[in-house]
Amino acid sequence: MKVSKKFKWEAAHRIPWYKGKCQHLHGHSYKMEVEFEGETDANGFVIDFHELKKMIQPLVDELDHTTIISEKDTELKQVFDDKKWKYFLLPFDSTAENLCKYLSSEITRLHSATLKQHSITAVEVKIFETETSCATCKADLK
Ligand SMILES: [Zn+2]
């Protein structure tokens, strides 16, 4: 059985080395779907949707209305540091794939006890950078 919940946030980013539009600072209305796989408990839940939201929302709040900057993008980071503007630092480029891997690993790292408690066997994260562009990452917990 699988249960999932959708989340969304607004953020700016750029891919500094990219030859094309994405090298310039621009924004996305990101959407994410987080799916937990497991058997239902005595109450008929894989996990309470409310509990799922409580686990994930703080990660989304950290990203919301920030500029996501790669550690390697020292030029942009310098501007934001000088201006004291809010940003979210990633150790890698902010592609949808990397964001997906990052969020998937954060969810399994921060919530390993809760996932185990609910016998969750897999966590799948989908990041929609646009309406039509999506990256998917599955963490198998078995
Ligand atoms: Zn983009």
Image: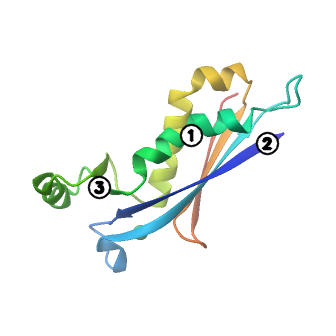
Circle 2 Cα neighbour tier, 10 Å, few/some/many (<14 / 14–19 / ≥20): some
Dot 3 amino acid type: Ile
- Asked if labels 2 and 1 touch by Cβ distance under 8 angstroms, the answer is no
What residue does disc 3 label? 69
Mark 3 or mark 1, which is nearer the start of the sequence? 1
> Quadrant of the rendered structure where residue 113 is?
top right
Which quadrant would the C terminus be assigned to in this image? top right
- The picture quadrant for ligand 1 comes to bottom left
Q: Decide: is 71 above or below 18.
A: above
Q: Decide: is 19 above or below 105.
A: below
What residue does disc 2 label? 2
Q: CA distance from mark 1 to mark 3?
A: 21 Å
Instruction: Specify whether 15 is left or right of 35.
Output: left
Dot 1 amino acid type: Ile
Q: CA distance from mark 2 to mark 3?
A: 33 Å
Circle 3 Cα neighbour tier, 10 Å, few/some/many (<14 / 14–19 / ≥20): many
> Residue 56 bears which disc, if any?
1
Q: Position of residue 120 (x, y in %)?
A: 72, 29
- Asked if labels 3 and 2 touch by Cβ distance under 8 angstroms, the answer is no
Is label 1 or label 2 in front? 1
Mark 2 or mark 1, which is nearer the start of the sequence? 2
The furthest residue to the left:
82
State the residue at coordinates (89%, 22%). Answer: 42
